[in-house]
Image (cartoon, helix red, strand yellow):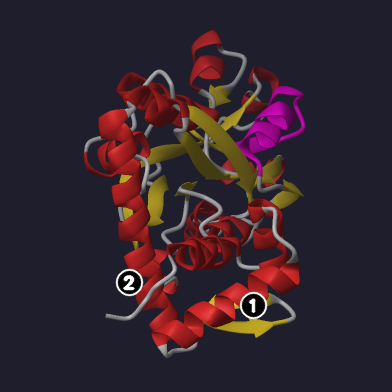
Amino acid sequence: MIPVNYHHLYYFWITAKAGRIGEAARELYLAQPTLSLQLKQLERALGNQLLVRSRKGVKLTPEGRIAFDYCERIFSQGAELVAALRPEQAQRAAILRLGVAGPISRHVVLQLLEHAQKISREVRISILGGPFDNLREQLEKHKLDFVVSTTDFSSQMGVEFRSRLAGAIPICFVAIPRLKARAPRFPADLSKLPLLLMAPENPVRKDVDLFLCRHKISVSVATEIEDSELIRFLALRGQGVATMDALTVREDLKSRRLMKLHRKDIGIRQNVWFVCGRHPKPNPVLRRIIQSLMERFSIKI
């Protein structure tokens, strides 16, 4: 039997999730040289290099990925032991680290939070916003548990991650009543008004560009922003016609602060993707929440 030091396994697990030895050392309250030495002792005990070290941080070798997967299961079972014998402690320890891409409507996030809290009132939710490239990196380093994005990037991350299309929200052209009155013919009159659009790399923006090209409309782009709430704010200030998802402007349309420039559905959708790791989370509460989101949750439009 190979003598495995489970403290060393835990240190390796934390380091792999942190992506940097210095960051892991701070989390573990260890000096960097001490942590590095114990990681090397684990590699010697297992007879394989587990981590590739560089100035940018550490990455798992193929053997390191196998070891990491075993660590996930080992410490998952440890959390289950705590949950079985001290369920109140398992509840308190549940923190869902959620990543939300900029274009995602706040209403989607609210629905997700309400769904999670129905499963456990004790869960704490930490939200990180930003571009999906940054969120993907944080998820890959295990600094996030779950990401909501307009793009399915799981195929770029390997088989240990999975995704699910949680919904497709209709996109519409909206403006304040004064601007709408200047564009009675849709979509031809879009050429008369400034447009507030998502950034060029956004999937919805690409579909909007195709829509305009298909109708041979040349437009004046006033602003390109990867933040749906900021675009909404500018639209309400009368800065131009905005392409918005129906959830974000639902209340504005009801109150007629904003109005659609078209009656029919234009056929453009904002996809909402959920992305997470395939391996179960150690905390049983998080495991139930993520499983429910990936299997049963659907966006209400």
Q: CA distance from mark 1 to mark 2?
A: 31 Å
For the N terminus, the quadrant is: bottom left
- CB under 8 Å between discs 1 and 2: no
- Residue segment shown in magenta: 227-242
Disc 2 crowd rating (10 Å Cα; few below 14, some 14-19, many 20+) is few
Residue 233 position within the rendered picture, expressed as x and y whole percent measured from the top left:
71, 27
| Residue picked out by circle 2 | 159
Residue 296 position within the rendered picture, expressed as x and y whole percent measured from the top left:
22, 36
Q: Amino acid at mark 1?
A: Leu
Residue 208 position within the rendered picture, expressed as x and y whole percent measured from the top left:
52, 53
Work out whether mark 1 precedes mark 2 in sequence or the reverse, and give the earlier one.
1
Mark 1 or 2: the one toward you:
1
The foreground one among 187 and 270 is 270
For the C terminus, the quadrant is: top left
Name the residue at 32% across, 67% down. Answer: 70
Tag 1's secondary structure? helix
Name the residue at 63% across, 43% down. Answer: 129
* 204, above or below 80, in the image: below
Residue 91 position within the rendered picture, expressed as x and y whole percent measured from the top left:
39, 26
142 horizontally vs 240: left or right = left
* 23, above or below 257, in the image: below
Disc 1 crowd rating (10 Å Cα; few below 14, some 14-19, many 20+) is few
| Residue picked out by circle 1 | 37
Name the residue at 36% across, 47% down. Answer: 282
The foreground one among 265 and 204 is 204
Specify the farthest residue to the left.
296
Q: Could you tell me if residue 17 is visible in this image?
A: yes
* 172, above or below 15, in the image: above
179 horizontally vs 280: left or right = right
282 horizontally vs 223: left or right = left
